[in-house]
Image (cartoon, rainbow, N blue to C red):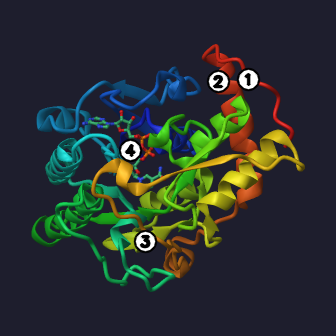
Amino acid sequence: MKILVTGVAGFIGSNLAQALLDKSHQVVGLDNMSQGNKFNMAGFDNHPDFSMHFEDVRDLAALIRTGEGCDVIVHLAAYKIPRYSDALDTLTINAAGSENVARAAVEHGCKVVAASTSDVYGKNPDIPFTEESNLVMGAPTVKRWAYAISKMFEEQLLFAYHERFGIDVVMLRFFGGYGPNQNLTWWGGPQSVFINSALDGEPLTVHGDGQQTRSFTYVSDHVNGIIASVEKPAANNLVFNLGQTREITIADLGRLIWRLVRGEDNEPKIDFIPYETFGKYEDVQRRLPDVNRARDILGVSPRVDIEEGLRKTILWQVARRREMGISTPDPVL
Ligand SMILES: NC(=O)c1ccc[n+]([C@@H]2O[C@H](COP(=O)([O-])OP(=O)(O)OC[C@H]3O[C@@H](n4cnc5c(N)ncnc54)[C@H](O)[C@@H]3O)[C@@H](O)[C@H]2O)c1
């Protein structure tokens, strides 16, 4: 198949592009490099079945041009949760990007596989979340919900395009991805920052009391779910949770990373940062997916356990830091 991947220079996009090329698909990449990284594309940017377009998903004409002849658009380009700025980019980039992808898909009669997020379950306390669970958002004065709302809009919009124009759409709700090519800042998630802090021997910074849980998912498990969604017609016009089913508190994640990087006997110093530091903020206390639908229809289940995944990620992060000229000790692992 010929597949347009938006956000190809980002974390999931670059891992996906490599895996699609390994499966002999043709990949057309699109990214405006706002968060993407050329290092992420180093493994495939010269591949004969890969072409790259430095474009913005807000540009409809560019999307229509790059989507020419494609069978599927995998839409990953998005702007994540703003912690230290306002929510306007999140709302406008994600809404405009989704609509332009849908319009390009109608133009070319191709299928759309779009990235949603576990964050859409919001404050729903009933775990594990199935795809039919309620999506429970907080007040609009808490900008933290802007990201989830932009993804809920994307889901509704793509289903509306399916209904009116007949294009096939698949929505993937990713749960906490980590692995090679992850962004090294908070943009990439707490594990990125904890690994950096542990390598530098500095205190770990935890938001809130650290008792909030997440289900961290190694990137190959996300990529397998995306590829199954691209290839299998049975996935069409459904929503899927893609995530690990092991819940871990953020504080325990920090301790695990510290142990893997610095050795068994060491306990990390943890600086707890109150949520008030981010203005009016609300966090999600527990997050755990029910992944039966992905197992039954996509034929995928999470395979990589968190310790194994973190070992690979730490080794990758050590190499990436050295590539960037950052002095980095060998991890204990
Ligand atoms: N990584 C996760 O754990 C996770 C969890 C839930 C949802 N998601 C979703 O999955 C998708 C991929 O996430 P990721 O972690 O790889 O993010 P990422 O930030 O690493 O990658 C996103 C890419 O999109 C590009 N981009 C942003 N705005 C753009 C624009 N206007 N035009 C063109 N390109 C643009 C960025 O430059 C970046 O390369 C996103 O939609 C994200 O919301 C990811």
Quadrant of ligand 1: it is top left
User: What's the residue at 20%, 43% (across, down)?
Assistant: 93
Name the residue carrying label 1: 328
The amino acid beneath tag 1 is Thr
**Circles 2, 3 touching at the beta carbon (< 8 Å):** no
**Inter-mark Cα distance, 3 to 4:** 20 Å
N-terminal of the two: label 3 or label 1?
Answer: 3
Residue 123: image tag? none
Quick check: marks 3 and 4 in contact, CB under 8 Å? no
> Looking at the image, is mark 2 or mark 3 nearer the viewer?
2
Residue, x 59% and y 59% (percent of image)? Answer: 250
Q: Please tell me in which quadrant of the rendered image residue 131 appears.
A: bottom left
Percent of width and height locating residue 196: 64, 34
Q: CA distance from mark 3 to mark 1?
A: 39 Å
Say what secondary structure mark 3 lies in.
strand
Q: If you read the primary sequence from the N terminus, does the residue marked by circle 2 or circle 1 appear first?
A: 2
Instruction: Decide which of tag 4 and tag 2 comes sooner along the chain.
Output: 4
The residue wearing badge 4 is: 3
Who comes first in sequence, dot 3 or dot 4? 4
Residue for point 43% across, 58% down = 230
Left/right of residue 327 with respect to residue 77 in the rendered view: right
Residue that label 2 marks: 321
Mark closer to the observer (1, 4): 1
Give the label, 4 or 2, closer to the camera: 2
- Residue count near mark 4 (Cα–Cα under 10 Å), binned few <14, some 14–19, many ≥20: many
CA gap, disc 4 and disc 2: 31 Å
Neighbourhood count class around disc 3 (C-alpha, 10 Å): few under 14, some 14–19, many 20 upward: many
Q: Secondary structure at mark 2?
A: helix
- Front label number (2 vs 1): 1
**Residue receiving disc 3:** 240
